[in-house]
Image (spheres, rainbow, N blue to C red):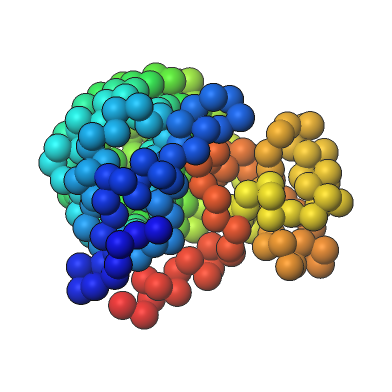
Amino acid sequence: MPKGKGAKGTKVTLKVAKRAVRITPDGRRRLILSKMGIITFPKCLLKLTNVDELDLSRNMIQKLPEDIGRLSWLRWLDLHSNKLESLPESMGNLVGLTHLNLSNNCLTSAGLPASLGALTGLTSLNLGLNQLDALPATMTRLDNLQELGLFDNCFTKLPECVRELRTHSKVNTRRNPLGDGEETPGVKPEPGERTFLVHESSLCRKCFKRCKEQNGGGGGGGGGDADMCEEKRIRTYKGLMVPNSVAAVDQDVWRIRKSVQ
Protein backbone atom coordinates (compact mmCIF):
# COMPACT_ATOMS: atom_id res chain seq x y z
CA MET A 1 0.00 0.00 0.00
CA PRO A 2 1.12 3.62 -0.47
CA LYS A 3 3.09 5.29 2.31
CA GLY A 4 0.49 7.96 2.90
CA LYS A 5 -1.67 10.71 1.47
CA GLY A 6 -1.09 14.42 1.97
CA ALA A 7 -1.37 17.73 0.15
CA LYS A 8 0.61 16.24 -2.73
CA GLY A 9 -1.54 13.13 -2.90
CA THR A 10 -0.59 9.52 -2.34
CA LYS A 11 3.13 8.86 -2.33
CA VAL A 12 4.21 5.81 -4.32
CA THR A 13 7.67 4.46 -3.57
CA LEU A 14 9.75 2.12 -5.71
CA LYS A 15 9.21 -0.63 -3.13
CA VAL A 16 5.43 -0.19 -3.29
CA ALA A 17 5.48 -0.19 -7.09
CA LYS A 18 7.52 -3.40 -7.29
CA ARG A 19 5.12 -5.16 -4.94
CA ALA A 20 2.15 -4.10 -7.10
CA VAL A 21 3.50 -5.71 -10.28
CA ARG A 22 1.45 -8.71 -11.42
CA ILE A 23 1.96 -11.26 -14.18
CA THR A 24 -0.86 -11.38 -16.73
CA PRO A 25 -2.14 -14.69 -18.19
CA ASP A 26 -0.13 -14.01 -21.35
CA GLY A 27 3.08 -13.53 -19.36
CA ARG A 28 3.34 -9.74 -19.31
CA ARG A 29 4.25 -7.74 -16.21
CA ARG A 30 1.45 -5.31 -15.32
CA LEU A 31 1.65 -2.53 -12.73
CA ILE A 32 -1.76 -1.31 -11.52
CA LEU A 33 -1.82 1.94 -9.54
CA SER A 34 -5.42 2.89 -10.30
CA LYS A 35 -7.71 4.79 -7.89
CA MET A 36 -4.94 5.65 -5.42
CA GLY A 37 -5.31 9.43 -5.18
CA ILE A 38 -2.04 10.07 -7.02
CA ILE A 39 -1.51 13.73 -7.98
CA THR A 40 2.14 13.76 -9.04
CA PHE A 41 3.46 11.18 -11.49
CA PRO A 42 5.72 8.82 -9.47
CA LYS A 43 9.26 9.34 -10.83
CA CYS A 44 10.29 5.99 -9.34
CA LEU A 45 8.34 4.26 -12.12
CA LEU A 46 11.02 5.32 -14.59
CA LYS A 47 13.29 2.73 -12.98
CA LEU A 48 10.98 -0.22 -13.62
CA THR A 49 12.45 -1.36 -16.91
CA ASN A 50 10.81 -4.78 -16.75
CA VAL A 51 7.16 -3.57 -16.67
CA ASP A 52 5.18 -4.06 -19.88
CA GLU A 53 1.85 -2.53 -18.86
CA LEU A 54 1.15 0.49 -16.63
CA ASP A 55 -2.27 1.49 -15.28
CA LEU A 56 -2.44 4.93 -13.63
CA SER A 57 -6.13 5.48 -14.38
CA ARG A 58 -8.67 7.17 -12.06
CA ASN A 59 -6.17 9.32 -10.21
CA MET A 60 -5.69 13.11 -10.15
CA ILE A 61 -2.51 13.43 -12.21
CA GLN A 62 -2.33 16.89 -13.78
CA LYS A 63 1.00 16.66 -15.56
CA LEU A 64 3.34 14.04 -17.00
CA PRO A 65 7.11 14.49 -16.60
CA GLU A 66 9.14 15.28 -19.70
CA ASP A 67 11.27 12.20 -19.10
CA ILE A 68 8.25 9.88 -19.37
CA GLY A 69 9.73 9.11 -22.78
CA ARG A 70 12.24 6.91 -20.99
CA LEU A 71 9.49 4.29 -20.61
CA SER A 72 10.11 3.16 -24.18
CA TRP A 73 9.62 -0.49 -23.22
CA LEU A 74 5.94 -0.03 -22.32
CA ARG A 75 3.40 -1.80 -24.52
CA TRP A 76 0.25 -0.61 -22.74
CA LEU A 77 -0.40 2.69 -20.94
CA ASP A 78 -3.70 3.63 -19.26
CA LEU A 79 -4.12 7.22 -18.01
CA HIS A 80 -7.88 7.53 -18.33
CA SER A 81 -9.82 9.61 -15.79
CA ASN A 82 -7.07 11.93 -14.60
CA LYS A 83 -6.72 15.72 -14.97
CA LEU A 84 -4.20 15.98 -17.80
CA GLU A 85 -4.41 19.16 -19.89
CA SER A 86 -1.42 18.48 -22.13
CA LEU A 87 1.18 15.85 -23.02
CA PRO A 88 4.97 16.32 -23.21
CA GLU A 89 6.81 16.02 -26.52
CA SER A 90 8.65 13.01 -25.13
CA MET A 91 5.45 10.95 -25.48
CA GLY A 92 6.71 10.28 -28.98
CA ASN A 93 9.54 8.22 -27.50
CA LEU A 94 7.13 5.57 -26.22
CA VAL A 95 7.58 3.69 -29.48
CA GLY A 96 6.74 0.32 -27.94
CA LEU A 97 3.12 1.28 -27.18
CA THR A 98 0.33 -0.65 -28.85
CA HIS A 99 -2.47 0.62 -26.57
CA LEU A 100 -2.83 4.14 -25.16
CA ASN A 101 -5.87 5.31 -23.19
CA LEU A 102 -6.12 9.05 -22.46
CA SER A 103 -9.90 9.31 -22.21
CA ASN A 104 -11.73 11.37 -19.59
CA ASN A 105 -9.03 13.99 -19.03
CA CYS A 106 -8.93 17.74 -19.79
CA LEU A 107 -6.79 17.55 -22.92
CA THR A 108 -7.00 20.38 -25.45
CA SER A 109 -5.82 20.26 -29.04
CA ALA A 110 -2.97 22.64 -28.19
CA GLY A 111 -1.85 20.13 -25.59
CA LEU A 112 -1.38 17.26 -28.06
CA PRO A 113 2.23 17.14 -29.29
CA ALA A 114 3.11 16.45 -32.91
CA SER A 115 5.28 13.61 -31.60
CA LEU A 116 2.15 11.45 -31.23
CA GLY A 117 2.68 10.62 -34.88
CA ALA A 118 5.83 8.73 -33.91
CA LEU A 119 3.82 6.07 -32.06
CA THR A 120 3.47 3.99 -35.19
CA GLY A 121 2.98 0.75 -33.25
CA LEU A 122 -0.34 1.91 -31.77
CA THR A 123 -3.32 -0.28 -32.59
CA SER A 124 -5.68 1.39 -30.10
CA LEU A 125 -5.84 5.07 -29.09
CA ASN A 126 -8.63 6.44 -26.89
CA LEU A 127 -8.94 10.26 -26.74
CA GLY A 128 -12.62 10.37 -25.83
CA LEU A 129 -14.13 12.61 -23.15
CA ASN A 130 -11.65 15.47 -23.53
CA GLN A 131 -11.83 19.01 -24.95
CA LEU A 132 -10.37 18.39 -28.42
CA ASP A 133 -11.40 20.10 -31.64
CA ALA A 134 -8.39 19.14 -33.79
CA LEU A 135 -5.65 16.50 -33.99
CA PRO A 136 -1.96 16.72 -34.95
CA ALA A 137 -1.51 16.24 -38.69
CA THR A 138 1.31 13.81 -37.91
CA MET A 139 -1.24 11.21 -36.81
CA THR A 140 -1.52 10.14 -40.45
CA ARG A 141 1.62 8.09 -39.70
CA LEU A 142 -0.28 5.76 -37.37
CA ASP A 143 -0.53 3.04 -39.99
CA ASN A 144 -1.34 0.24 -37.54
CA LEU A 145 -4.18 2.04 -35.76
CA GLN A 146 -7.29 -0.13 -35.56
CA GLU A 147 -9.33 1.68 -32.91
CA LEU A 148 -9.59 5.44 -32.41
CA GLY A 149 -11.89 6.94 -29.77
CA LEU A 150 -12.81 10.62 -30.32
CA PHE A 151 -16.24 10.55 -28.65
CA ASP A 152 -17.46 13.36 -26.37
CA ASN A 153 -15.12 16.09 -27.61
CA CYS A 154 -15.57 19.41 -29.43
CA PHE A 155 -14.98 18.43 -33.06
CA THR A 156 -17.07 20.47 -35.50
CA LYS A 157 -15.50 18.70 -38.46
CA LEU A 158 -13.69 15.44 -38.92
CA PRO A 159 -9.89 15.94 -38.66
CA GLU A 160 -8.17 15.54 -42.00
CA CYS A 161 -5.69 13.06 -40.55
CA VAL A 162 -8.61 10.76 -39.66
CA ARG A 163 -9.84 10.85 -43.25
CA GLU A 164 -6.38 9.83 -44.43
CA LEU A 165 -6.00 6.86 -42.09
CA ARG A 166 -6.37 3.77 -44.26
CA THR A 167 -5.95 0.80 -41.96
CA HIS A 168 -8.16 1.71 -39.01
CA SER A 169 -11.15 -0.54 -38.41
CA LYS A 170 -13.21 1.70 -36.12
CA VAL A 171 -13.42 5.38 -35.25
CA ASN A 172 -15.92 6.64 -32.69
CA THR A 173 -16.89 10.34 -33.01
CA ARG A 174 -20.21 10.16 -31.19
CA ARG A 175 -21.48 13.16 -29.25
CA ASN A 176 -19.37 15.74 -31.07
CA PRO A 177 -20.91 18.86 -32.67
CA LEU A 178 -20.01 17.66 -36.16
CA GLY A 179 -21.58 19.51 -39.08
CA ASP A 180 -23.94 17.95 -41.59
CA GLY A 181 -22.32 15.41 -43.84
CA GLU A 182 -19.43 14.79 -41.46
CA GLU A 183 -19.43 11.03 -41.34
CA THR A 184 -16.74 8.87 -39.84
CA PRO A 185 -15.03 6.58 -42.36
CA GLY A 186 -15.79 2.91 -41.82
CA VAL A 187 -18.56 3.52 -39.30
CA LYS A 188 -22.24 3.01 -39.99
CA PRO A 189 -24.20 5.11 -37.49
CA GLU A 190 -27.02 3.46 -35.59
CA PRO A 191 -29.73 5.94 -34.52
CA GLY A 192 -30.38 6.08 -30.81
CA GLU A 193 -27.37 3.98 -29.90
CA ARG A 194 -25.79 4.60 -26.49
CA THR A 195 -22.25 3.40 -25.93
CA PHE A 196 -20.62 2.36 -22.68
CA LEU A 197 -17.18 1.28 -21.52
CA VAL A 198 -17.39 -1.93 -19.55
CA HIS A 199 -15.03 -4.71 -18.56
CA GLU A 200 -16.27 -8.26 -19.12
CA SER A 201 -15.77 -9.10 -15.42
CA SER A 202 -18.51 -6.58 -14.56
CA LEU A 203 -21.16 -8.46 -16.55
CA CYS A 204 -23.30 -11.33 -15.41
CA ARG A 205 -22.92 -14.61 -17.31
CA LYS A 206 -26.12 -14.07 -19.31
CA CYS A 207 -25.17 -10.55 -20.43
CA PHE A 208 -21.59 -11.51 -21.21
CA LYS A 209 -22.91 -14.28 -23.47
CA ARG A 210 -25.24 -11.79 -25.17
CA CYS A 211 -22.32 -9.38 -25.74
CA LYS A 212 -20.25 -12.12 -27.34
CA GLU A 213 -23.12 -13.04 -29.64
CA GLN A 214 -23.68 -9.43 -30.74
CA ASN A 215 -19.94 -8.98 -31.15
CA GLY A 216 -19.65 -11.83 -33.57
CA GLY A 217 -18.35 -14.29 -31.00
CA GLY A 218 -15.41 -12.11 -29.93
CA GLY A 219 -13.86 -12.22 -26.50
CA GLY A 220 -14.92 -8.73 -25.40
CA GLY A 221 -17.90 -6.46 -25.81
CA GLY A 222 -19.56 -3.30 -24.59
CA GLY A 223 -22.69 -2.97 -22.56
CA GLY A 224 -24.54 -1.07 -19.88
CA ASP A 225 -23.59 -0.96 -16.23
CA ALA A 226 -23.74 -4.37 -14.54
CA ASP A 227 -26.71 -3.33 -12.38
CA MET A 228 -28.63 -2.09 -15.41
CA CYS A 229 -27.69 -4.71 -17.99
CA GLU A 230 -30.79 -6.84 -17.38
CA GLU A 231 -33.03 -3.88 -18.18
CA LYS A 232 -31.33 -2.57 -21.29
CA ARG A 233 -30.46 -4.05 -24.59
CA ILE A 234 -26.69 -4.20 -24.77
CA ARG A 235 -25.12 -2.56 -27.81
CA THR A 236 -21.53 -3.23 -28.77
CA TYR A 237 -18.98 -0.96 -30.38
CA LYS A 238 -15.57 -2.45 -30.98
CA GLY A 239 -14.00 0.87 -31.86
CA LEU A 240 -14.68 2.25 -28.40
CA MET A 241 -13.49 -0.72 -26.43
CA VAL A 242 -9.90 -0.43 -25.27
CA PRO A 243 -8.36 -3.52 -23.66
CA ASN A 244 -6.63 -1.49 -20.97
CA SER A 245 -9.79 0.22 -19.75
CA VAL A 246 -11.53 -1.30 -16.75
CA ALA A 247 -14.24 1.34 -16.57
CA ALA A 248 -17.63 -0.09 -15.69
CA VAL A 249 -19.63 3.12 -15.44
CA ASP A 250 -21.89 5.05 -17.78
CA GLN A 251 -20.03 7.76 -19.68
CA ASP A 252 -22.65 10.23 -18.45
CA VAL A 253 -21.39 9.57 -14.93
CA TRP A 254 -17.82 10.19 -16.08
CA ARG A 255 -18.83 13.70 -17.13
CA ILE A 256 -19.98 14.66 -13.63
CA ARG A 257 -16.44 15.43 -12.48
CA LYS A 258 -15.85 17.80 -15.38
CA SER A 259 -19.20 19.56 -15.09
CA VAL A 260 -18.77 20.50 -11.43
CA GLN A 261 -15.28 21.99 -11.81
**Residue shown at 42%/35% (left/top)?**
53
| Residue found at the very far bottom of the displayed protein | 260
The residue closer to the viewer here, 186 or 144, is 144
**Residue shown at 53%/62% (left/top)?**
251
In the rendered image, residue 189, in percent from the top left (x then y), is placed at 62, 45
Q: Quadrant of residue 14?
A: top left
In the image, residue 219 above or below residue 107: above
In the image, residue 128 above or below residue 244: below
Numbered circles on residues, count? 0
In the rendered image, residue 139, in percent from the top left (x then y), is placed at 30, 30
Quarter containing the C terminus? bottom left
Q: Quadrant of residue 126?
A: top left
**Residue shown at 27%/51% (left/top)?**
13
In the image, residue 52 above or below residue 104: above
With 47 as the anchor, is 160 left or right in this view? right
In the rendered image, residue 167, in percent from the top left (x then y), is placed at 48, 20
The residue closer to the viewer here, 26 or 252, is 26
Residue 69 in view: yes
| Residue found at the very far right of the displayed protein | 206
**Residue shown at 26%/60% (left/top)?**
11
In the image, residue 210 above or below residue 23: below
The residue closer to the viewer here, 210 or 16, is 16
Quarter containing the N terminus? bottom left
In the rendered image, residue 182, in percent from the top left (x then y), is placed at 46, 44
Residue 191 in view: no
